[in-house]
Image (spheres, rainbow, N blue to C red):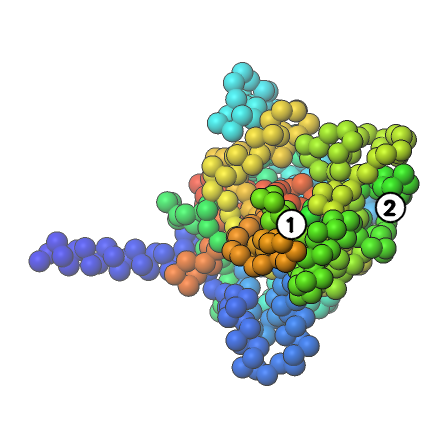
Amino acid sequence: MKNVFFAIICIILLLVKNSFGDFGCECGAFKNNQEEAAKCFEAQKILDTDINLAFNPQSRIVGGYDVKESCMKRPSLVLIRVLGLVDKGLIGYCMGSIINKNYVISAAHCYCASKYGECTENDGAMISGRTESGLPKYGKANLVSFADPRTATNTMVFVPGFAPSYSKSQVLELQYQATGPGVSPVDEIVIHPQFILNKRVQNDIALVKVRKPFDFSSPLKVSPICLPPPGFQDHDISAYVTGYGELFERNSCNTGLGGPEEYRPCRKYFAMNNDLFEVENACLNFASPADRDPECKEFRNQHPAYSKAKALISVDGTIRTCHPPSFDGVASWCAVCVEGTKMGEPGFCPEDDQFLEIENRNDVSAHVGWGYCDKMCFQFTKANDLQEAEITALSEQECQKRSEKYLLHAETLANRPEKALELCGAKEKKFTLTTFIKVGETFIANETVSQEIWGGSDTCQGDSGGPLWTVKDGKAYLVGVTNRGTGCARKDTYGIYARVAAHRDWILLMADSGKCDA
């Protein structure tokens, strides 16, 4: 009987500990994901235009949705402003997550750019051998990395929960309430001792100590996110990314859905029909290559509904995709480079391709080498509304498999995640296409086929330091910190996130003074 009683007491103590997290703070408060928020908006009878804005897939972190404060609470999220060391008019923004009453977790690279302050670099030398992920190893250091103390004096932390809304402009107005709870100067920035900007990019994690301790008496305004306990599943899971970063890849145009090449960067030059096209900072507004396949054109004449959607056709046993002449209201298009193609094939991109012979050269075909321009191309990309996207934290095996190619060249090693220290995140989109078989002169619907594409939602410039977070048992857990990536939301690429579980002991040690029960 005593053993049973003891076991019950242990379980109760464990539940209490989990509820209050590692620092004795009650953690993990949030309100509503996208689906739950839609019900909240409906209950509040917000105008349809507002609902459409909040959940328009083109309104995004890149490929996400607006976080509306009235129905969605993100109390652990903070916006961090860093002023230039010499030029105070030079302003940088990063994101962060509150983990206890004194500390915010963010990304180290936010505080090591020379314009904001020079970080001292770890002097450990490269040694023989490679890590499990094939990256260089380094020996013990006499001097470890640390942030320039002057950077902290130019850094300010803003808590969106105390603003009238989550819009960035209103959050920044909290600076005029310097004595209020929504803004705090910074006393210290602690970067990971092994991080070196642009050289050793793993361990890209930092702790920002605020001067005014956070008051957690209103947990849906401000409260800490939970750290993942030992054994927590942090990969091969659904997760969220949140921030005020760019809405689209800066100074570029990528393709969207509907064409043969989706979520890929547009190319500046291409040849078609013995003409050379230069399309920098523009998309083409004449008919796309979709109609260059006469059988697809015939198919759409028989099935007009597929003038706005993709379908598969089977002709004499050969299956190919028919792309619509426009998609989701977009008819403008661009050519793209296709990896693995050879000279003379559609999608091939040689160096200095504008100077090559163009006779008998077609860089696009009905099925290869082009895509419809994203609606955000050449638009204003700065986010004012807080953005969020649901993505997948890939399994360790999938992350390593997708990044093997980056081991081939020294200049691409930074794109290879270190499995023990980092996570990969990407958006998986699944589609169902109908296959039509040509029987005589008629296309007859046959079977449906499932397809998937990775891309379209991602973090981007300005989201650095923000959370990759997931929900378990009704609580928010921080599994990653936004670090880096190749472009934003491109096909078959991924964002790289510092793995919080791998840095758990360091975080607990360095942020110990922020305990709520101290």
- Residue type (three-letter) at the residue carrying disc 2: Glu
Q: CA distance from mark 1 to mark 2?
A: 28 Å
Image position, residue 40 (x, y; %): 53, 76
- Residue type (three-letter) at the residue carrying disc 1: Thr
- Residue 205, located in which quarter of the rendered image? top right
Question: What residue sits right under mark 1 in the picture?
Answer: 321
Q: Residue at x 89, y 43 (%)?
A: 278
- Residue reaching furthest bottom? 45
Along the line of sight, the residue nearer the viewer: 40 or 138: 40
Near mark 1 (Cα within 10 A), the count class, few <14, some 14-19 or many ≥20, is some
Image position, residue 133 (x, y; %): 51, 29
- Residue reaching furthest top? 128
Tell me how many marks there are: 2
Q: Earlier in the sequence, mark 1 or mark 2?
A: 2
Question: What residue sits right under mark 2 in the picture?
Answer: 280
Along the line of sight, the residue nearer the viewer: 399 or 114: 399
Q: Residue at x 69, y 35 (%)?
A: 339
